[in-house]
Image (cartoon, helix red, strand yellow):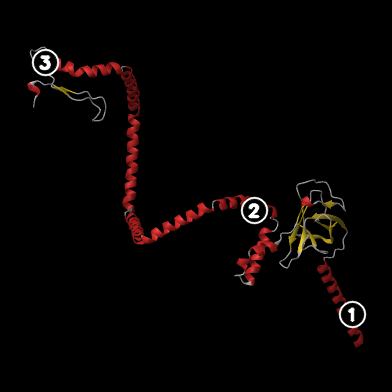
Amino acid sequence: MRMGATLAKLGVFVVITLLSGAFVAVLAGNLRFGPSQDYKAVFSSASGIREGSEVRIAGVPVGSVSKVSLDGRDGAIVEFSVDKSHRLYHGTEVAIRYKNLIGDRFVELRQGTGDMSTLQPGETIPASQTTPALDIDQVVNGFRPLLTGLDPDQTNRLATSLIAVLNGQETAISSLISELTPMTTAIADRDEAIGQIISNFNDVLRTINDRHDRFDSLIDGLADLVRGLSADRDSISRSLVKVDGLTAALGDVVTSVRPDLAASIANLGTLSQNLNSQADTLQLVLNKLPETYRLTTRASSYGSFVNFFVCGMAIKYGAGRADQTPMFTSPAARCQP
């Protein structure tokens, strides 16, 4: 009786162990038992992909890689299976992604923008629709001077961040590098000018350093000015309010005189045109006016031929002090000081 109970426990233990081992084997080997369909994809590089690597759609495992081989033209053919419930199209795009930092990778399937007709089992996805994995070794080697100063944990965090940021961005990175090339070439061509700018900037900094006392005084003066403005902010605010009132009053004045001012300006334009059209006559009158005035004054000094005696005369033709003719004075004795 006791022996039977022991054998029963042993049998249960063996069954559980076998089931657990089978479960681990299924997970580790990425084994799938449902019906599947086989496809092929051509890559320029299948580095990191091996038999049993996962095939995912939107991050969900849907199949596995069954074979990796050379296509004889500097490329690789990856054969993989996908659960029959998932349909692929002629426009489907395939990319190799990093799974973790130890180098494991998986194949990602995503719907492209090309032909939407169904891809038949056994057909091949061309290299124009595939993307190889980012070569993280080249990126990390470029950071070698930086990484030498980091501890292992920092290096791992940096590598993880690089994978998260750069994975799937190969086309964008290539375009960025292509755009940066002309810029770096232009900078290299202007190396002398850039060096001169840096030298001049050093001269400026040296001059500022030589006059640091004055510079400090200037900064202190600016600080005092700001403090003074801050202390008088109430007065300044009241002044601004009054300025606003003055502006409003001036606006009202300008509004009230605008019609008359517009008419005066229009008439002034007409007057200017008339004077300009009779410029020769006006010039003749002004030239003869002094002699005519002298003769008139002489005649009036010997009799009451006129009811006025003019000792001097000037014609003002503008608003300024200089906008007038010279003063024409009489030589008569009564006009002398």
Mark 1 — residue?
11
Disc 1 to disc 3, C-alpha distance = 156 Å
Decide if residue 223 is on the left or right side of residue 104. left
Asked whether 200 or 84 is in front, the reply is 200
**Distance in Å between CA atoms under marks 3 and 2:** 99 Å
Relative to 274, say whether 111 is above or below.
Answer: below
Q: Where does the N terminus fall, quadrant-wise?
A: bottom right
Kindly identify the residue that appears in the image at 57 percent across and 50 percent down: 186
Residue at the disc numbered 2: 177
Q: Earlier in the sequence, mark 1 or mark 3?
A: 1
Q: Is residue 307 visible?
A: no
- Which residue is nearer to you in this view: 169 or 185? 185
Asked if residue 236 shows in the view, the reply is: yes
Image coordinates of residue 299 in percent, x first then y, are: 11, 13
Residue 97 at x, y percent in the picture: 74, 60
Q: Position of residue 326 (x, y in %)?
A: 20, 25
Dot 1 alpha-carbon crowd within 10 angstroms: few under 14, some 14 to 19, many 20 or more: few
Distance between mark 1 and mark 2 Cα atoms: 65 Å
Q: Which mark is residue 298?
A: 3
Q: Quadrant of the C terminus?
A: top left
As drawn, is 201 to the left or to the right of 26? left
Specify the farthest residue to the front.
Answer: 192
Neighbor class of circle 2 (other Cα within 10 Å; few <14, some 14-19, many 20+) is: few
